Amino acid sequence: MIKKIPLFFIVFVIILLYSFINESANSDGSKENVKKENPLVTKVISTAISYNKVPYKYGGTTRVGMDCSGLVYTSFKEINRKLPRSSKNMSKEGEAVLLSEVQIGDLLFFDIAKFEGEINHVGLVTSIDNGEVFFIHATTFRGVIITSINEPYWNKAFVKAKRVL
């Protein structure tokens, strides 16, 4: 005797398969540029995110206040990866990668308008969703936040990406 499979089970399996296919491939069929579960990257990201909403403080590296390079420096210090303290010097570390090829844990470097002329801001890639890159960083007005590289201000200020892990 053939048993009938409940309709909700069939729908669940279809949704599960659809979700898996969409997460593992872009519209052009290529796989998303995301590091596989690397415990070091996970630790760096979770450390950085634990500082979310901490106020900005020039030179800060604590929960009292944090600046952009302090956030990255402190997050990587958790895995015993020593980076220079300034965003300009951090940008000299690691391997250059194209923005289209960044992965979670990579660093993004910027030349922001009020300090034009050289690299003066850094962010840490926290996630990539359908090709949209999100990064955590410390801003003077909003403190530590997660932002999309697609925001016009940050997209225009972007200079380069580096992989240090």
Image (spheres, rainbow, N blue to C red):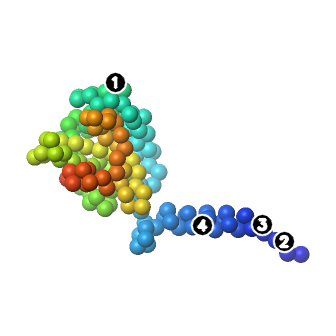
* Residue marked by disc 3: 6
Amino acid of disc 1: Val
* Callout 3: SS: loop
* Residue 65 drawn above or below residue 115: above
Whole-percent x, y for residue 103 in the image: 36, 55
Question: Which one is in front, 164 or 72?
Answer: 72
Q: Which residue is mark 1?
A: 64
Query: Can you say whether 119 is above or below 128 in the image?
Result: above
Which residue position holds label 4?
Answer: 17
Marks 1 and 2, the one that precedes in the sequence: 2
Answer left or right for 60 relative to 3: left
Identify which amino acid the numbered label 2 is placed on: Lys
Q: Which residue is mark 2?
A: 3
Q: Nearer the viewer, residue 151 or 108?
A: 151
First along the sequence among labels 3 and 4: 3
Give the CA distance from mark 2 to mark 3: 9 Å
Ranked by sequence position, the earlier of labels 1 and 3 is 3
